[in-house]
Image: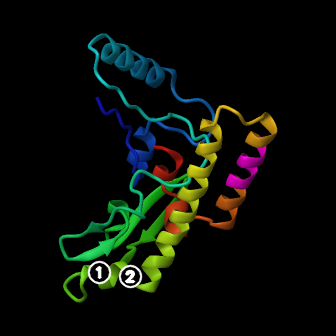
Amino acid sequence: FYCTTLDYVFSQETDDKKLFTYSGTPDPAYEEALGAARRFAHEKNYIFVDYPLVVKEQLAYCEQNPVNYIFITAGGEVTCCPYLSRHANPRYFKDEVLTVPRKSFGNINNNTLEEIWNNRDYLEFRHIFATRIAAYQELMEVWGDSEPSLIVFEESEEKYYAALKANPLPRECATCPKIYGF
């Protein structure tokens, strides 16, 4: 089973119905329903993947990973994410209503995909995520090593968070639930 919650909140109605929360405690009924689904999957020997109900921290990158994936609209616009492919993308984030414009790096009807992929704006956009991913991978290597001390763990975490701070997310991505693990 792949169990996701509503992860793109685009109206007051969807904001009211979303399961996750940016602060506080999730509805106990949601936690119970997910627990029941987890138990059912375990009993049936199904793989079960679910998402958090409470924001913990911003991730290095989201599952739409713009370093490796592209999204092309029906009209040929090349963008980094399906959530940024519409002309105007309404978004509810922490009780604030935003409109995020389309993030297009070009159109395959006007340029080759290679030209678009290699244009300066797209390269710079992807570089932010590539740097954040590299920092995350370095952190995981330290955590995967059986020898480091707590001091080494703390130093590697400090280095990771410094890399995230030095490479802040593009404004379009900073308010997206996907970057928080939803």
**Residue 102, relative to residue 2: is it above or below?**
below
The image quarter containing residue 108 is: bottom left
2 and 1 marks in contact (CB < 8 Å): yes
Q: Amino acid at mark 2?
A: Asn
Q: Is residue 50 magenta?
A: no
Q: Amino acid at mark 1?
A: Glu
| Res. 94 visible in picture | no
Residue sitting at x 62%, y 65%: 168
| Residue 59: x %, y % from top left | 56, 50
Quadrant of the image containing the C terminus: top left
| Residue 7: x %, y % from top left | 40, 46
| Residue 144: x %, y % from top left | 60, 37
**Residue 59, relative to residue 114: is it above or below?**
above
Q: Which residue is mark 2?
A: 118
Q: Secondary structure at mark 1?
A: helix
Q: Secondary structure at mark 2?
A: loop
Residue sitting at x 31%, y 33%: 2
**Residue 182, relative to residue 125: is it above or below?**
above
Q: Which residue is mark 1?
A: 114
Residue 174 appears left or right of 4? right
Instruction: From the viewer's side, name the closer residue of 140 and 40.
Output: 140
Instruction: From the viewer's side, name the closer residue of 126 and 93.
Output: 126
Outermost residue toward the bottom in this view? 110
Mark 1 burial class by Cα count in 10 Å: few <14, some 14-19, many 20+? few
The image quarter containing residue 79 is: bottom left
| Res. 141 visible in picture | yes
Residue sitting at x 29%, y 16%: 45
* The magenta segment: 154-160
**Residue 86, relative to residue 106: is it above or below?**
above
